[in-house]
Image (cartoon, coloured by chain):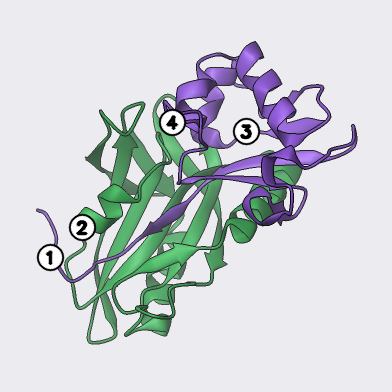
Amino acid sequence: MSLLLSKDLYQQLRTHGEETYPHECCGILLGKSTEENLHVRQLIRAGNTRTDSAHNRYNIAPQELIQAQREGRKQGLDIVGFYHSHPDHPAQWSTTDFAEAHWFGCAYVITAVEQGAAQITNSFLLTGTSEDDKAFVPQFIAIE
Amino acid sequence: MEIHIPTPLRTYTGKQETVSVEGATVAEGLAALTAAHPAMQQHLFTAEGKLRSFVNVYLNDDDVRYLPAKEDSPVSPTDELTIIPSIAGGAASRGCRR
């Protein structure tokens, strides 16, 4: 299952990471899930509540998630994924990312930002059904 | 009351985004939800019956954990419950897996 999004949205999530550098950015992806892909239609920037360690941690307030879910309902869209940046760190999921991942079937997009410039962006699909069998699977990013 | 179901848990509610249940409290609403959709039980609660640490339940705009009566908080038929798993992570300092 690939992640499908427009070039504009792709650029937006990468730019967000550059703007918040050296801190991690984070946001929510609204769209629709099909058998073939997760089609992102809208990106919602979120605040990083981990101000104590914003250079290597992120957390999205539940209130922002609820607001995004409400916004999605109005438009017939669902939360299909999330994105965040890794300042001066590879665009690979960390043990922290994995431990804190609970949205099965959703995309976790990570952009490496080196010295303030966005580099590689990767997406990982959280597969499985529970904490016991979950796994991150690399996901192709298709730019429409 | 209506309970809004997050994307990953709709598998267990027959793809329903919103489930209508009856109940006088948050706990009763959640119990009605798991009674109607038993597979939800293990995803919301631990074996000891406590809400899983990463599962947030909001009564309208309030986190149930911070309400005075917590899960025993009273609800009306027009109230909305929202189940929302947490989202967090980060590069952390112990390095990344490849």
Q: Are marks 4 and 1 on the same chain?
A: yes
- Secondary structure under tag 3 reads loop
Q: Regarding mark 4 in the picture, which secondary structure is present there?
A: loop
At label 4, which amino acid type do we have?
Thr
Chain ID for label 4? B
Marks 2/3 same chain: no
Are callouts 4 and 2 both on one chain? no
Relative horizontal placement of residue A2, taking residue A119 as reference (left or right): right
Above or below, comparing residue B30 to residue A84 in the picture:
above
Q: Distance from label 3 to label 4 (Cα)?
A: 18 Å
Question: How many residues crowd mark 1 within 10 Å: few (<14), some (14–19), many (20+)?
Answer: some
**Residue beneath label 3, please?**
B5
Rendering colour (chain B): purple
The residue lying toward the viewer, choosing from A134 and B69, is B69
Q: Residue at x 66, y 29 (%)?
A: B17
> SS class of the residue under badge 2?
loop
Which one is earlier in the sequence, the residue at label 1 or at label 3? 3
- Residue B73: x and y in percent read 77, 42
Q: For mark 2, what is the residue? A: A94
Residue B84 image point, x, y percent: 57, 44
Callout 1: SS: loop
Provide the residue designation for mark 4: B46
Quadrant of the image containing the N terminus of chain B = top right
